[in-house]
């Protein structure tokens, strides 16, 4: 279910409840079941949805509430708060500071949009006066360096990589060293992906991370991977200290649920979303407006 449809289904469920003359437990259950169905269809993990339902029932004690308008408001607010809570791990991610060198490592499966997102992230900061640089530590996929080089050249961002070197750790370390010397304040390390979650990939991520000591590791996730989001995010989190999430391809047929799962699995916030293939199709992620939009 795409985001707009999810918003529609949830608002419909709330509207149906609002139309009921009396809001009793049956009406509340029907409403919550509707919302549960909508969230599951949007690929939110079953456990998260079940927890949310339990929490709402705990908050909304029908006997204690005055009749009519108030109940609806309270239920609506409880749903809003629960969805916000699911997207807010409770602590902000590390935020690089302009003028101070930070190393940011990107991880994610092949095709997630990692390379594109690295450049978008660099470009976003460059427009704000930062001095970003890109390091291509993806020696697995043929053409990865060319792609990064092309993106970097287009946006006039310095880059580092090699056609010959096959050791990603060596390239990552050399690139980070070089750009530290050049006083870049945002050194972005693009890493390799694989089609599947493989032991070799996670071991490589661990080694690159150990060698470059990133201030922040960002997990990039394709929003259309659905129920696979939780396990994928958790697998990366177990090998490197993921501190933030970027969800890509939120345009088109994007499903919202994966984002909720990624937050739960990594205990890290979503910081940006990708909304297209172009460099500037990149938005800061903000929980409350996102949930408001979700609820329609
Ligand atoms: P990587 O293998 O993870 O490095 O993925 P790429 O950066 O090569 O991206 C894979 C494909 O997804 C490319 O065709 C990108 O243009 C596309 N892509 C990346 N981000 C977005 C996005 O936010 N929206 C859309 N529609 N396409 C995206």
Image (spheres, rainbow, N blue to C red):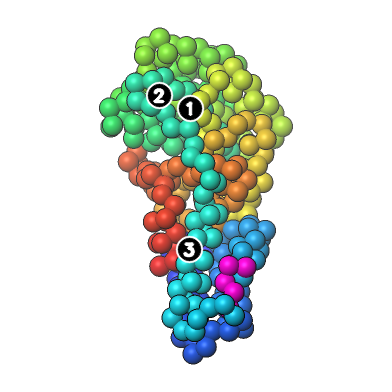
Rendered location of residue 187, percent (x, y): 43, 22
* CB of mark 1 near ligand 1 (< 8 Å): no
Asked whether residue 61 is drawn in magenta, I would say yes
Q: Nearer the viewer, mark 3 or mark 1?
A: 3
Residue 281 in which image quadrant: top left
Q: Mark 2 points at which residue?
A: 186
Residue visible at 56% across and 64% down in the picture: 39
Whether pointer 3 and pointer 2 mark residues with C-beta atoms closer than 8 Å, the reply is: no
Numbered disc 1: secondary structure: strand
Residue visible at 49% across and 84% down in the picture: 67
Q: Looking at the image, is 205 positioned above or below residue 39?
A: above
Mark 3 or mark 1, earlier in chain: 3
Q: Residue 80 carries which label?
A: 3
Rendered location of residue 5, percent (x, y): 46, 67
Q: What stretch is highlighted in magenta?
A: 58-62
Q: Name the residue under label 1.
A: 104
């Amino acid at each position: 279910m795409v985001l707009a449809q999810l918003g529609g289904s949830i608002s419909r469920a709330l509207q149906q409840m609002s139309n009921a003359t009396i809001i009793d437990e049956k009406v509340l259950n029907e409403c919550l079941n509707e919302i549960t169905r909508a969230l599951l269809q949007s690929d939110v993990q079953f456990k998260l949805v079940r927890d949310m339902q339990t929490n709402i029932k705990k908050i909304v004690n029908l006997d204690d509430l005055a009749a009519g308008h108030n109940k609806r408001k309270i239920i609506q607010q409880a749903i809003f708060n629960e969805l916000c809570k699911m997207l807010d791990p409770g602590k902000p991610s590390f935020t690089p500071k302009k003028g101070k060198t930070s190393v940011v490592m990107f991880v994610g499966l092949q095709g997630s949009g990692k390379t594109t997102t690295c450049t978008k992230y660099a470009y976003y900061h460059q427009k704000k006066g930062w001095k970003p640089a890109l390091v291509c530590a993806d020696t697995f996929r043929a053409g990865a360096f060319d792609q990064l080089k092309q993106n970097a050249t287009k946006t006039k961002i310095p880059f580092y990589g090699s056609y010959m070197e096959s050791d990603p750790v060596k390239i990552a370390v050399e690139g980070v060293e070089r750009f530290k010397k050049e006083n870049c304040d945002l050194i972005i390390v693009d890493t390799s992906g694989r089609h599947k979650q493989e032991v070799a990939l996670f071991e490589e991520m661990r080694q690159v991370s150990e060698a470059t000591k990133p201030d922040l590791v960002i997990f990039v996730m394709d929003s259309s991977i659905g129920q696979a989001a939780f396990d994928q995010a958790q697998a990366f989190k177990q090998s490197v200290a993921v501190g933030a999430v970027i969800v890509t391809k939120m345009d088109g047929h994007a499903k919202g649920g994966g984002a909720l799962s990624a937050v739960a699995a990594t205990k890290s916030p979503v910081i940006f979303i990708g909304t297209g293939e172009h460099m500037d199709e990149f938005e800061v992620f903000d929980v409350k407006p996102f949930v408001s939009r979700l609820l329609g």
